[in-house]
Amino acid sequence: MAKAAAQFTCTECGAVHRKWAGQCDACGAWNSIVEEAPLSTGPGTRPTRGRAIALGALSAAEAPPQRAASRIDEFDRVLGGGLVAASAILVGGDPGIGKSTLLLQAVAAFAGQGLNCLYISGEEAAAQVRLRADRLGLAQAPVQLGAETGLRDILATLEATRPDLVVIDSIQTMWLDTIDSAPGSVAQLRAAAHELVSFAKRRGVAVILVGHVTKEGQIAGPRVIEHMVDTVLYFEGERGHQFRILRAVKNRFGPADEIGVFEMTGAGLAEVANPSALFLSERGTPAPGSVVFAGIEGTRPMLTEIQALVAPSPLGTPRRTVVGLDSARLSTILAVLEARCGIPFAGMDVFLNVAGGMRVQEPAADLAVACALLSAREDIALPAETVVFGEISLSGALRPVTQTENRLKEAQKLGFSAAIAPRAPKPAAPPGLKVQQMPDLAEVVGQIFGAG
């Protein structure tokens, strides 16, 4: 039998190379390619004949998965209604954003509901975790704590204790002695994640893995880890803001793109039951460049403030600074305003921001961004009681968006009495809220701002 050839893997993106190189061709990282020992069936072994697996019909009825609620409503919402047994969850976020604090509060809450919970720390000593628990008022929570990085010892402990939930903080610190590479390498991450996910499925234990993120904001390590687990959550937020967003980007047991909103306080993370009211709480007198966007995050309507500033630029190349939105989308909206509405932004610096550290990703924010830019450029403030939403096409037409009725109901609940939106086949405005339906962006420019 021919000897299996060694392979070389990039520790940044997981790309496989035939030989070592100083720079990865896939992601461009330098000195990130390491040698991995190939998988082998061992000397003297022969392939054996497989056994037939049991097959079933699609019509077979199965009971929905049992869920355990933590009573932290925002956390349960993102999970799809609660924790599912035998599920594997990966939580990523920037360093110091509050991942360990959130999971310590969550595991204490699950333990308070009668679950047997373990917290395994690979980054901090047990004394450090106890100090955090004491600061959060969780010192008396019935959570078993351990500090270990050897995966073999951790799995032996889990086999002996048979918990309902185990938190591994973090997966990058785990190492398996059968893999000849350092902790945090691609081979170690892949093997450790495989062992923990297999244990979760085999023993019916829910496993929460904490993952580091790269400078681009993605979970570090090979993408195959995200495919192994059932749920991938990102904990987002700006260091200068007190708000934190827990966002589901993958969930096999619930809706993806669902979010939970938390506020960082001296006593830990406090859930925010009405994020729209909180994000708009500091909004005062209407000012040019300020627009309220009625958006949808997962299944929840969310009102956020979009702020724009347009000023003459002393530079040869004007600045385009965006916080909380896609910068490429801003460039597209500026091009549509100039090409379809005759409003140039050449020679002007443009600054765009979503208030409160929120990040908006849906295309329905296009019209709110355009109105904020026009309001700042023309120095005209929109009425304080108006919300805006709608998608802008490259032709300048406004396209209807989903869940219009929910957006309008949320706006009315918070005291808004007017809305600017695209034309819809069946307008479903609640009583007391006036909706101005616009066919295209040129109509908005002419009627609302009188520009063009």
Image (tube, rainbow, N blue to C red):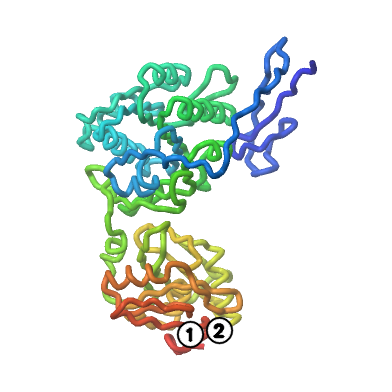
Q: Are marks 1 and 2 in contact (CB under 8 Å)?
A: yes
Q: Position of residue 33 (x, y in %)?
A: 65, 33
Q: Position of residue 337 (x, y in %)?
A: 55, 79
| Quadrant in which residue 418 is drawn | bottom left
Direction from residue 139 to residue 172 in the image, left or right:
right
Q: Residue at x 48, y 39 (%)?
A: 230
Q: Is residue 89 visible?
A: yes
Q: Which residue is mark 1?
A: 445
Which element carries disc 1, helix, strand or loop? helix
Which element carries disc 2, helix, strand or loop? helix
Q: Residues within 10 Å of mark 2 (few under 14, many from 20)?
A: some
Q: Position of residue 57 (x, y in %)?
A: 57, 40
Foreground residue among 195 and 238: 195
Q: Is residue 287 visible?
A: no
The amino acid type, in three-letter code, at marker 1 is Val
Foreground residue among 108 and 380: 108
Foreground residue among 77 and 343: 77
Question: How many dots with numbers?
Answer: 2
Q: Position of residue 148 (x, y in %)?
A: 40, 21
The amino acid type, in three-letter code, at marker 2 is Cys
Q: Which residue is mark 2?
A: 341
Q: Residue furthest top?
A: 44
Direction from residue 356 to residue 256 in the image, left or right:
right
